[in-house]
Each structure stands twice: as C-alpha cells, then as structure tokens.
Amino acid sequence: MLSSLYGRIETQLISILLDPGSQRLYIKKDVDQCMRYRPTGEEELIHGFFGGEMTRPHRHLCYKIHLQSLDNQYACNFEPLNEAEICSRVPVLQPGSWLSEFRERGIDVLVEDERPIEVLIEADIYAKLLTGRREILQCGLVATETYLGWIVTGKMQSCIKASSMKVLSMFVHSESEQVVGFKTPVGERVMKRQKLRFKHIS
C-alpha cells in the first residue's frame, strides 16, 4: 500500500506494510535520513527469529512521522523505530481481468512495480486503521479497507500450478546474523536439526 509521508521540507510517496504480527513500528533508515527527521529518543531491543533464536541487543532511533492517505481524507502521526532493512520487496498485484471487479465494487488499488517496504505498521495500530469494510472477490482475493487505503490479500483461483512461488518472510537483520541462504550459525543449527530428524525417520 502506498501513502504520503510528510517531512520537514518535502513529501514522499512510500510503501507501507501493515503487519498484524509485529509488535513495533519501523521506518527504513534511508527514508528518515532523506526526510531529515530529528530523533525523539532511542530504544534497545532484542529481536526474535522463528525457532526461538534471539539477536544481540540492537539500538534503534525513534522518530515522529506524519502519514496521509493518497486521497487526503485521513492523516495520522506515528513514532516508529528506524531499521536499515525492514523486509524484501512485497509481490504486487499484477494487471488482469480481476481489476474490473475492483472497479465495480468501488475499490481503488494501484498496480505498481515491486518496491522495498519503507514503513511497517504494528498490530495495535493496524487494528485501529481498519474501517470494517471487506470484500471477497470472485477471483479469490480479499480486499480490506483501511483509512490509509485498500490492502489486497489472498490467493487467486487458478487451474495452473506454478513450479515455484515467491514467499515473503519477515526477518530482522543485525550485524551478526545474516539470514540469507542459511549460512549463519542460526541457519546451520536449523539445518543440522533437520538432518538429524530425517535420519531418525529413515
């Protein structure tokens, strides 16, 4: 979802991810630098991975930001923590016949190129942004309205099975833990546990 981010000097169009599983708000570090925000404080957090692994304490600066919907009907202030990378690029809605169904139901969605997530909104605020309107489309997608715009989730019905699927996984990176390709001590331990389990089964 796209929204307008207001800074001290300029306004920027940014990509937002509403994550009902996150406990904190985050803003991409290069965005807060570009918008020339001044820190309002700082926090030291320990991030958890799937499987129970924990990172070392990680320092984040806190900023006050102002977001506004693209139709200028809603605006809000948040205080996210900065993070170098929030997550990978989120798969976007591709052009197709389903777009006409969106228009028929009065759902305004943007078909954009994939771009990195620049602001992540946590569970508590996610719930407050919901308007209560939800549309289940014939193609299998679910459109949920928020005060900042529409979000589209779900799986489209198709008779074609793809041999590969792009999956978005949320990881928090630190200097000591890199979660690319299972090359970290964390990943190696997971791989070892899997090998032992498969050996026991066989």
Image (cartoon, helix red, strand yellow):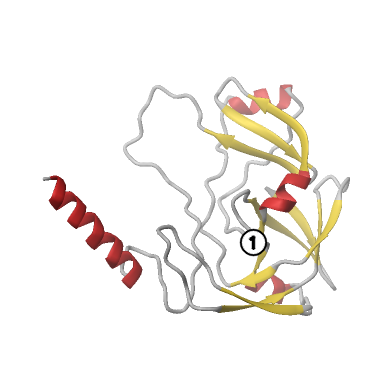
Is any part of residue 103 visible from this angle?
A: yes
Q: Nearer the viewer, residue 79 or 84?
A: 79
Label 1: few (<14), some (14–19) or many (≥20) C-alpha neighbours in 10 Å: many
Which residue is found at the position 59% from the left and 51% from the top?
21
Q: Percent from the top left, x then y, of residue 63?
A: 76, 72
Q: Percent from the top left, x then y, of residue 65?
A: 79, 66
Q: Nearer the viewer, residue 87 or 24?
A: 24
Of helix, strand and loop, which one carries label 1? Answer: loop
Question: Which residue in the structure is indicated by mark 1?
Answer: 118
Q: Is residue 42 above or below residue 93?
A: below
Residue found at the far left of this picture: 202
Is 189 on the left-hand or right-hand side of 65? left
Q: Percent from the top left, x then y, of residue 187?
A: 32, 65
Q: In which quarter of the image is residue 111?
A: top right
Which residue is found at the position 34% from the left and 41% from the top?
164
Q: Percent from the top left, x then y, of residue 133?
A: 76, 31
Which residue is found at the position 55% from the left and 34% from the top?
154
Q: Is residue 147 above or below residue 102?
A: below
Q: Is residue 28 above or below residue 104?
A: below
Is 93 on the left-hand or right-hand side of 12? left
Is 64 on the left-hand or right-hand side of 139? right
Is any part of residue 184 visible from this angle?
A: no
Q: How many labels does the image show?
A: 1
Q: In which quarter of the image is residue 83?
A: bottom right
Q: Quadrant of residue 80?
A: bottom right
Is 200 on the left-hand or right-hand side of 15? left
Image quarter in which the C terminus is found: top left
Which residue is found at the position 75% from the left and 79% from the top?
41
Q: Nearer the viewer, residue 54 or 86?
A: 54
